[in-house]
Image: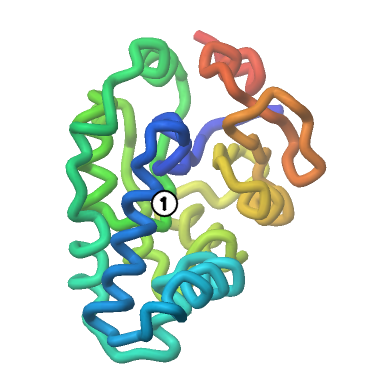
Amino acid sequence: MIISTIFFDLDDTLYPASNGLWPLIRDRIGLFMLERLMIPADEVQPLRHKLFEEYGTTLRGLQLNYAFDVADFLAFVHDVPLAEYLQPDPLLQIVLQNLPVRKFVFTNADVKHARRVLRILQIEQYFDGIIDVVALDPYCKPMPQSFKIALQAAGEPDPYRCAMIDDIPRTTQAAREQGLFAILYGTDEPHPQADAALADWSRLPELLDVRN
């Protein structure tokens, strides 16, 4: 296996899912639906979950049914105090610094949120670019088209030279179906929807055989 490019998911992958940041963002999505789209309170959470499951992001589902400013949505839901939830991970920093491959953030969030996260984690300098939900429009992970867009944006025509690291099994499954080596982050237990599982960043270079 020859890996030249690694795509990293952002939220709940480059920082621990246990820190509580994603539930806060999820609540902001619900608040936007309630306050800006005037969706009844008792319908917000069931609808948010339904759209996320059906379309990959609540945003994509909302776009098909409501008129609103996407930039306003993204700014609203990511208006959270990141520094209260995130802190640098020295091990992750070392691993990223020493991986002799190109590295991209591939996220269903927007580039502004991604850059804020990377800066707080002090790892922005290790990435060659960010492929965000705006660049993927009208698609998003795990839609097959999103991986084609990511490959094109990364300038890598061969998916078999790429790896995808994500915390959501349906995304790793979709990546694998597109030819990428799919790694499920957050567990060491093998998973049927991924080629490999990873909970300890120190194992990544050996797992991909991309050590210096």
In the image, farthest residue toward the right: 192
The image quarter containing residue 198 is top right
| Residue situated in front as seen by the camera: 136 or 162 | 136
Residue 175, how many percent across, how many down?
Answer: 64, 51
Q: Determine if residue 102 is in view.
A: no
| Residue situated in front as seen by the camera: 173 or 46 | 46
Residue 191, how many percent across, how many down?
Answer: 77, 37
Asked if 97 appears above or below 158 in the picture, the reply is above
- Quadrant housing the N terminus: top right
**On the rendered structure, is 162 left or right of 109?**
right
The image quarter containing residue 19 is top left
Asked if 65 appears above or below 26 in the picture, the reply is below
Please name the residue shown 19% across and 62% down the image: 75
**On the rendered structure, is 154 left or right of 206?**
left
Q: How many marks?
A: 1
Please name the residue shown 59% across and 37% down the image: 163
Residue 104, how many percent across, how many down?
Answer: 40, 40
- Disc 1 is placed on an element classified as loop
Residue tagged by mark 1? Answer: 107
Instruction: Please state which amino acid type lies under the numbered disc 1.
Output: Thr
